[in-house]
Amino acid sequence: MASILPKSRVLLPRHGVVSQVRQATTLGIAQSRATPKTPTKYGGVYSVTLIPGDGVGKEITQSVEEIFEHVNVPVEFERFDISGDTSQDAALFKQSMDSLKRNKVGLKGILYTPVERSGHTSWNVAMRQQLDIYASLVLCKSVPGFPTRHRDVDFAIIRENTEGEYSGLEHQSFPGVVESLKIMTRAKSERIARFAFDFAIKNNRKTVTCVHKANIMKLGDGLFLNTCRKVAEEYKDSGIKFNDLIVDNCSMQAVNRPQQFDVLVMPNLYGSIISNIGAALVGGPGIVPGANIGREYALFEPGCRHVARDIEGQDVANPAAMILSSTMMLRHLGLDHHANQIASAVYKVIADGKVKTPDMGGKDHTSDFTFAVIKALA
């Protein structure tokens, strides 16, 4: 089946530095593994940790499981039904972490983190920090058949996942006075900057933009910005352009003229905000896939991290983001044929416009969309 989206040139480090035309049906991460450790594989079947998450997680991961079964994808899931809403699942969470460490690859929905409960750790953040999956990658791209206010949007958000305001270091020094520490290090800033430039090179991108607030946080964000500038100097010969933008201006520019952006690299909190803006530009959280990449482990999840508890159990969630995230996972495992096949079917269903979940302006159900994808695969 022909790809609906245009083709792009991607460098595949798996086979050395080779230039190849690949269907741009999903985001090709094209990152070389920094260690010899590989995903766990038994008898030609990859073992992958599956954490459906809270809210609509079980419904949209079920879509993935049904599609994988139909296509006979060589992946076997180790499933852990954890809820981030309670600390009583701590033992099960530890088991899921052991599974991720063993399998090296996971697919997950979003775990709910209560706002009201102090001292309750976000298990989403805990996974990223404990496994050092430091790079969050979200692709915001206009999809044919899903009309939005802006056309021709196509940019990648690369977010540092393990420090910044998400370090979790805060305390009440005096009643009514809270001190919250933002941790920025040169080593992790350099690591995420190199990831951004390597991604740009391997995916035929032209410009890397550093998003920051160094005009106010001169030491913390100043360190991040200056580190990105030094790394950019090393990549001059690659032809990748570099610029920087203050985060509040970036937010305005994103909703005004998002077509100007290509690759955006930023600290943790800004990445959370800009990825939500980016998702809204191309259709919402149901359409944007995402990945979290580290030296040893990779965890794939929808790019816009929403639990969607308000529609839980109603069979109306758009499963496209989760399905496309799973195809990114398949690319990571080297199963490009299955990834192209499934992603092309998803984009065909969206382009045809016959099956639309409520977020797409229709009245169809999650199960209807899943069946339509399976039918397109026939």
Image (cartoon, rainbow, N blue to C red):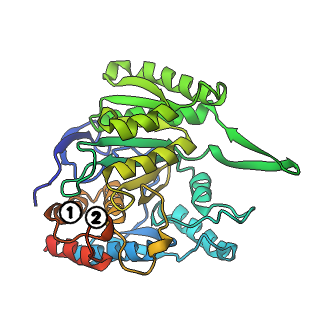
**Mark 1, other Cα within 10 Å: few <14 / some 14–19 / many ≥20:** many
Q: Which mark is residue 350?
A: 1
- Residue picked out by circle 2: 360
- Amino acid under label 1? Ile
Please identify, in this view, whether the residue under mark 2 or under mark 1 is nearer the observer: 2
Q: Earlier in the sequence, mark 2 or mark 1?
A: 1
- Identify which residue, 165 or 163, lies in the foreground: 165
- Identify which residue, 357 or 292, lies in the foreground: 357
Screen quadrant of the N terminus: bottom left
Q: Position of residue 202 (x, y in %)?
A: 31, 37
Which residue is pictured at 58% across the width and 36% down the height? 188
In space, the residues marked 2 and 1 are separated at their CA atoms by: 9 Å
- Identify which residue, 50 or 207, lies in the foreground: 207
Q: Position of residue 47 (x, y in %)?
A: 42, 69
The image quadrant of residue 69 is bottom left
Q: Give left or right: position of 13 versus 221.
A: left
**Mark 2, other Cα within 10 Å: few <14 / some 14–19 / many ≥20:** many
Any part of residue 378 in sight:
yes
The image quadrant of residue 181 is top right
- Amino acid under label 2? Met
Q: Give left or right: position of 368 versus 272.
A: left
Screen quadrant of the C terminus: bottom left
Which residue is pictured at 59% across the width and 24% down the height? 215
Q: Secondary structure at mark 1?
A: helix
